[in-house]
Image (cartoon, rainbow, N blue to C red):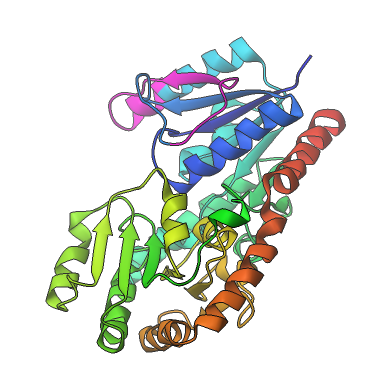
């Protein structure tokens, strides 16, 4: 009989990184390792998936309603009902909120439980400069998060840098698997005058910093274009920033693209301007297409993936001028771009699904048979 793995998450229908990772990992566990995989998500009864999931996965929807106590009550009643029905061998919680971190207390611990942290702890920081009161409440929340993390058999993070954020003894590093690894005939030529960035409009992704850096790039290379794909949030003011810098002819903002692989293929450079990251899966995706990456050396992820001056460039976090000169450096040198792109393609083989999901299989087997 197949072992049962239950994932608990907020949603799987959207275009985010967590949804993409879960679609790859859960599908691979079902199709290649023979697990029976269940996924609990919230308020997605009639939602379609942005990413492709295996047809063998079993889905469970919980309708949550109201606020606070009412919401939590409907959430817990739904989970307990599903747990009783399927009796899982391992539960993996993919929920970056406090209710996810306190799941072992809220629902009991009917079997070994794993917590998957898909973002940096810095996600709690919403501004470059916070008030003393905000810093105090963030400190208290970090303490609560560390307490919740201790309740799990394993607390899985994505990079060695993320590991250093937590004061836990149950930590394990397992990176995100590659979404794709295209054939050589589909790789980037590195000849198109196009630079790519992907991610939702948010403080974390730092596209305001990228747009400001592009002012200098565009001045020297007006024929090059920057394309940013991701969920658009008008409140972030990115379009207004583009217009105020007179860059509307060289920067285009697009909504999420299902066939993002084609956009990587068309690009000659990929830029990550994030203030902080959990991993940086877009970097590995771009590199799989032979596209060299330039990234701020933010906490945490890029320095685990990019080898400076080998498969891309790392820039001091927040140094907008240096980001500009780094972009210009690779625009000016097509041979260096191609060399770095070739190295990048080779280096990301370590993130192939068969290698990464094998680590999850080992963890599950250890928990099932040794707990």
On the image, which quarter does residue 124 sit in? bottom left
> Looking at the rendering, in which quadrant would you find the C terminus?
top right
Q: Where is residue 204 drawn, in percent x and y? A: 38, 63
Q: Where is residue 94 drawn, in percent x and y? A: 54, 39
The answer to whether 35 is drawn above or below residue 320 in the figure is above
Q: Nearer the viewer, residue 49 or 166?
A: 49
Q: Nearer the viewer, residue 197 or 263?
A: 263
> Looking at the rendering, in which quadrant would you find the N terminus?
top right
Q: Nearer the viewer, residue 267 or 77?
A: 267
The answer to whether 257 is drawn above or below residue 32 in the figure is below
Q: Where is residue 252 drawn, in percent x and y? A: 24, 63
Rendered residue at 33%/24% (across/down): 70
Q: Is residue 64 magenta?
A: yes
Answer with left or right where residue 9 lies relative to residue 159.
Answer: left
The magenta segment is: 51-74
Answer with left or right where residue 245 lies relative to residue 195.
Answer: left
């Amino acid at each position: 009989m197949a072992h049962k793995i239950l994932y608990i998450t907020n949603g799987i229908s959207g275009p985010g990184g967590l949804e993409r990772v879960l679609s790859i990992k859960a599908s691979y566990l079902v199709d290649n390792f023979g697990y029976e995989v269940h996924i609990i998500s919230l308020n997605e009864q009639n939602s379609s998936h942005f990413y492709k999931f295996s047809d063998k996965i079993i889905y469970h929807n919980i309708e949550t309603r109201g606020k606070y106590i009412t919401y939590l009550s409907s959430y817990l009643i739904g989970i307990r009902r599903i747990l009783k029905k399927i009796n899982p061998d391992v539960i993996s919680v993919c929920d970056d909120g406090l209710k996810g971190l306190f799941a072992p207390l809220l629902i009991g611990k009917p079997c070994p439980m794993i917590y998957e942290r898909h973002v940096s702890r810095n996600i709690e920081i919403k501004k470059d400069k916070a008030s003393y009161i905000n810093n105090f409440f963030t400190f208290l929340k970090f303490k609560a998060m560390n307490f919740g993390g201790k309740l799990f058999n394993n607390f899985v993070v994505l990079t060695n840098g993320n590991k250093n954020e937590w004061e836990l003894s149950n930590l394990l590093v397992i990176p995100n698997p590659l979404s794709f690894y295209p054939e050589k005939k589909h790789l980037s030529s590195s000849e198109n005058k196009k630079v790519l960035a992907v991610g939702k409009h948010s403080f974390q992704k730092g596209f305001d910093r990228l747009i400001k850096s592009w002012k200098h790039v565009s001045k020297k290379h007006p024929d090059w274009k920057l394309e940013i794909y991701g969920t658009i949030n008008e409140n972030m003011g990115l379009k207004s920033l583009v217009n105020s810098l007179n860059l509307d002819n060289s920067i285009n903002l697009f909504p999420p693209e299902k066939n993002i692989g084609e956009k990587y293929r068309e690009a000659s450079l990929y830029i990550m301007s994030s203030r902080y990251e959990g991993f940086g899966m877009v970097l590995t995706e771009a590199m799989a297409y032979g596209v060299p990456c330039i990234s701020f050396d933010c906490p945490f992820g890029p320095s685990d993936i990019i080898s400076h001056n080998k498969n891309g460039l790392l820039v001091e976090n927040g140094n907008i001028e240096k980001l500009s000169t780094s972009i210009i450096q690779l625009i000016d040198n097509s041979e260096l771009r191609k060399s770095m792109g070739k190295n990048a393609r080779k280096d990301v083989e370590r993130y192939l699904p068969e290698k990464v999901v094998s680590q999850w299989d080992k963890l599950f087997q250890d928990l099932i048979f040794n707990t």
